[in-house]
Amino acid sequence: QVQLVESGGGLVQAGGSLRLSCVTSGRTFSTYAMGWFRQAPGKEREFVAAISARGGSTSYADSVKGRFTISRDNAKNTVYLQMNRLKLEDTAVYYCAGGSVATITRSYDYWGQGTQVTVSS
Protein backbone atom coordinates (compact mmCIF):
# COMPACT_ATOMS: atom_id res chain seq x y z
CA GLN A 1 0.00 0.00 0.00
CA VAL A 2 1.42 3.33 -1.08
CA GLN A 3 1.44 6.03 1.58
CA LEU A 4 2.53 9.66 1.42
CA VAL A 5 2.90 11.52 4.70
CA GLU A 6 3.51 15.26 4.80
CA SER A 7 4.94 17.27 7.66
CA GLY A 8 6.34 20.71 8.34
CA GLY A 9 3.28 22.89 8.02
CA GLY A 10 2.39 25.53 10.56
CA LEU A 11 1.84 29.21 11.28
CA VAL A 12 4.40 31.70 9.99
CA GLN A 13 4.51 35.45 9.54
CA ALA A 14 4.51 36.97 6.11
CA GLY A 15 8.05 37.08 4.77
CA GLY A 16 9.04 34.00 6.71
CA SER A 17 10.00 30.50 5.62
CA LEU A 18 8.83 26.93 6.06
CA ARG A 19 10.04 23.62 4.73
CA LEU A 20 7.55 20.87 4.00
CA SER A 21 8.56 17.23 3.83
CA CYS A 22 6.78 14.22 2.38
CA VAL A 23 7.87 10.65 2.99
CA THR A 24 6.69 7.93 0.61
CA SER A 25 6.38 4.23 1.44
CA GLY A 26 5.09 1.24 -0.45
CA ARG A 27 6.68 1.95 -3.82
CA THR A 28 10.06 2.56 -5.44
CA PHE A 29 10.26 6.27 -4.71
CA SER A 30 13.21 7.00 -7.00
CA THR A 31 11.34 5.79 -10.07
CA TYR A 32 8.61 8.40 -10.11
CA ALA A 33 8.10 12.12 -10.36
CA MET A 34 6.68 13.94 -7.35
CA GLY A 35 4.66 17.10 -6.95
CA TRP A 36 3.20 19.57 -4.50
CA PHE A 37 -0.28 21.03 -4.75
CA ARG A 38 -2.25 23.35 -2.50
CA GLN A 39 -5.86 24.20 -1.82
CA ALA A 40 -6.98 27.41 -0.18
CA PRO A 41 -10.43 27.75 1.44
CA GLY A 42 -13.13 28.12 -1.19
CA LYS A 43 -10.72 27.51 -4.06
CA GLU A 44 -9.80 24.59 -6.25
CA ARG A 45 -6.63 22.63 -5.68
CA GLU A 46 -3.76 24.09 -7.70
CA PHE A 47 -0.36 22.92 -8.86
CA VAL A 48 2.62 24.33 -6.96
CA ALA A 49 5.74 22.46 -8.03
CA ALA A 50 7.00 19.19 -9.50
CA ILE A 51 10.26 17.31 -9.74
CA SER A 52 11.36 14.44 -11.97
CA ALA A 53 12.34 11.05 -10.61
CA ARG A 54 16.06 11.77 -10.41
CA GLY A 55 15.62 15.41 -9.53
CA GLY A 56 17.13 16.79 -12.71
CA SER A 57 14.03 18.68 -13.81
CA THR A 58 11.68 20.91 -11.85
CA SER A 59 8.60 22.95 -12.64
CA TYR A 60 6.85 25.70 -10.69
CA ALA A 61 3.63 27.64 -10.75
CA ASP A 62 4.22 31.26 -11.69
CA SER A 63 2.88 32.37 -8.31
CA VAL A 64 5.70 30.65 -6.41
CA LYS A 65 8.58 30.82 -8.89
CA GLY A 66 11.65 32.34 -7.29
CA ARG A 67 10.30 31.84 -3.76
CA PHE A 68 9.71 28.07 -3.48
CA THR A 69 12.14 25.25 -4.20
CA ILE A 70 11.24 21.60 -4.66
CA SER A 71 13.89 18.95 -4.03
CA ARG A 72 14.12 15.28 -3.24
CA ASP A 73 16.35 12.82 -1.43
CA ASN A 74 15.82 9.43 -3.02
CA ALA A 75 17.84 7.70 -0.32
CA LYS A 76 15.28 8.92 2.22
CA ASN A 77 12.19 8.51 0.02
CA THR A 78 11.45 12.15 0.73
CA VAL A 79 10.44 15.18 -1.30
CA TYR A 80 10.74 18.68 0.12
CA LEU A 81 9.21 22.05 -0.55
CA GLN A 82 11.26 24.96 0.74
CA MET A 83 9.02 28.01 0.94
CA ASN A 84 10.65 31.43 1.36
CA ARG A 85 9.25 34.98 1.42
CA LEU A 86 5.84 33.61 2.24
CA LYS A 87 2.79 35.71 1.45
CA LEU A 88 -0.70 35.79 2.90
CA GLU A 89 -1.99 34.23 -0.31
CA ASP A 90 0.20 31.17 0.25
CA THR A 91 -2.13 30.11 3.07
CA ALA A 92 -3.55 26.71 2.11
CA VAL A 93 -3.48 23.00 2.76
CA TYR A 94 -0.44 21.63 0.94
CA TYR A 95 -0.57 18.16 -0.56
CA CYS A 96 2.24 15.91 -1.67
CA ALA A 97 1.52 13.85 -4.80
CA GLY A 98 3.18 10.85 -6.40
CA GLY A 99 3.22 10.35 -10.13
CA SER A 100 3.35 7.17 -12.20
CA VAL A 101 6.01 8.34 -14.64
CA ALA A 102 9.60 9.46 -14.20
CA THR A 103 9.25 12.74 -16.01
CA ILE A 104 7.50 15.84 -14.70
CA THR A 105 3.75 15.48 -14.95
CA ARG A 106 0.60 17.30 -13.86
CA SER A 107 -1.20 13.95 -13.38
CA TYR A 108 -0.74 12.10 -10.10
CA ASP A 109 -2.06 8.84 -8.71
CA TYR A 110 -1.12 9.03 -5.05
CA TRP A 111 -1.82 11.78 -2.53
CA GLY A 112 -0.91 12.62 1.03
CA GLN A 113 -3.36 13.79 3.65
CA GLY A 114 -2.20 17.39 3.49
CA THR A 115 -0.50 19.78 5.88
CA GLN A 116 -1.83 23.23 6.78
CA VAL A 117 0.28 26.30 6.07
CA THR A 118 -1.02 29.57 7.49
CA VAL A 119 0.70 32.86 6.77
CA SER A 120 -0.18 35.74 9.07
CA SER A 121 0.35 39.47 8.70
Image (spheres, helix red, strand yellow):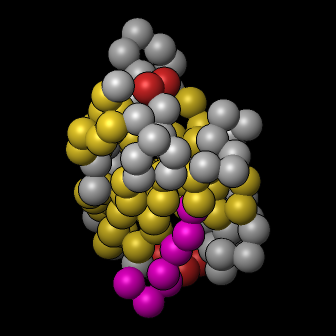
Classify the position of the N terminus by image quarter.
bottom left
Q: Position of residue 105 (x, y in %)?
A: 70, 52
Q: Nearer the viewer, residue 2 or 24?
A: 24
Q: Nearer the viewer, residue 78 or 17?
A: 17
| Residue sitting at the far bottom | 75
Q: State the residue at coordinates (24%, 39%).
A: 11
Q: State the residue at coordinates (50%, 51%).
A: 84
4 vs 77: above or below: above
Q: Position of residue 107 (x, y in %)?
A: 63, 44
Q: Is residue 85 visible?
A: yes
Q: State the residue at coordinates (63%, 41%).
A: 64
Q: Nearer the viewer, residue 63 or 17?
A: 17
- Residue 57 lies left or right of residue 77; in this view the side is right
Q: Position of residue 15 (x, y in %)?
A: 45, 41
Q: What are the residue bounds of the magenta stretch?
A: 70-76
| Residue sitting at the far top | 42
- Residue 98 lies left or right of residue 42; in this view the side is right
Q: Magenta stretch: residue 45 in it?
A: no
| Number of numbered callouts drawn | 0
Q: State the residue at coordinates (74%, 76%).
A: 56
Q: Position of residue 29 (x, y in %)?
A: 48, 76
28 vs 108: above or below: below
- Residue 90 lies left or right of residue 112; in this view the side is right
Q: Is residue 105 visible?
A: no
Q: Magenta stretch: residue 72 in it?
A: yes
Classify the position of the C terminus by image quarter.
top left
